[in-house]
Image (spheres, rainbow, N blue to C red):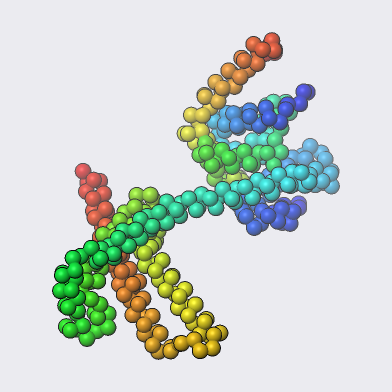
Amino acid sequence: MPDWKQIVRKNLRVLRACSPEFTEEVAAHLEDSYEALLREGVTAGVAFQRTMSQIEGRRKSWLTLHLLKEELMNVLTRMNGFIRKVALPGLLTFAAYAFTMNAWMFVPAHIHSKIYRLELYRLFDVPFLLLPLGIWCLLCLLPICGALGGFLSQRNGGSRPQRIAAALFPSEIIGFLFLLVFADDFALSRFLPGYWWNTAVVLKEFGLTLLEYVVLPAAFLLLGAGVAEKIGRDRSQTHCNI
Amino acid sequence: MASVNAQIKRGSAELAVLTLLAEHPLHGYEIAKQIEAQTNGVLRFDMASLYPMLHRLERKSWVKAEWQTLPNGRRRRCYGLTASGRKQIAPLREQWRAFFHALQSVTGFQNA
């Protein structure tokens, strides 16, 4: 008995790359065809040739085209899921985040200066507490943004990792941009003579910037997403109990 | 036996497959063989036309496929009708009835 799976893999290479499940299905179909021909009294050689004709020539091209189309549809379906469950909630979270972080500009100038005078480094000698009090106030608004991202992703059927990714979207984007700038600066310092680079200073600045713009906001966004999820779960349990 | 134009065959194939699967789930080869046998060879599917159609029906959620192990130990992907697919049969039949009726009025062709 010919090994139809092997034959299909060899003849339809695109199948092997795209869908192992369809390979098995096609092989099973050929196996059934071949055995039916043998039962009809056809010789093994002729049965093999007639079975093979189903995946040769024009039919092979049609099958290959169909597979490529199926793969494209799968990619589009996956992309559609990613857009609805992660990208769109994430972008809305980012918009809310950008608005929140810029809200500082709308604070009247006289309050501005009073808050600035209250810098926390006077109270604690810990690096990340050197942030001005105003930024801490804004950070405290970020859980609302995180909750928004998590909620929207959940509403669109997002899984837990997708909800987290949507809630952390602003930190992900900013973190990625910082890494890009860091890598770019590093590369320039290697290739451009005279380009300023002091590893100790850069790493310290980079670490503090990441902490201020990526890690801390991420913690607050995540906190919001977690609280929103817990509230949602409690509410759904209450509904079930009713 | 008169051969059937590819377009007409493609259009009628969905109804034929859905009607067949309404009785019980079948795998691809069985579907092709049963349709061929029941239509005396007028409707005949090769793999390049059968599986794209089955996958299209699956994407529309009219059929659902699952792997089953046959008594001889072989695995086959069997297609069964979903509730949504079952609902499609009556409207499709009605469309085809209307089509044949219209054709009959124009050409004077009669059912055998």
Left or right: where A47 falls relative to B5: right
Outermost residue on the front side: it is A109
- Report the front residue among B46 and A5: B46
Left or right: where A40 falls relative to A72: right
- Report the front residue among A33 and B84: B84
Q: Can you give x and y, in whole percent of width and height, for residue B95 in the image?
A: 56, 22
Give the residue at x 38% y 58%. A90
> Above or below — where is B10 with respect to B108?
below
Q: Can you give x and y, in whole percent of width and height, for residue A120 in the image?
A: 19, 79
Q: Looking at the figure, which quarter contains the C terminus of chain A?
A: top left
Q: Is residue A213 visible?
A: yes
Q: Can residue A51 be seen in this view?
A: no
Q: Can you give x and y, in whole percent of width and height, for residue A165 in the image?
A: 39, 62
Left or right: where A94 falls relative to A15: left
Give the residue at x 35% y 77%. A209
Left or right: where A114 falls relative to A99: left
> Above or below — where is A55 with respect to A149?
above
Give the residue at x 33% y 76%. A211
Rendering quarter of residue A139: bottom left
Q: Can you give x and y, in whole percent of width and height, for residue B32 in the image?
A: 67, 35
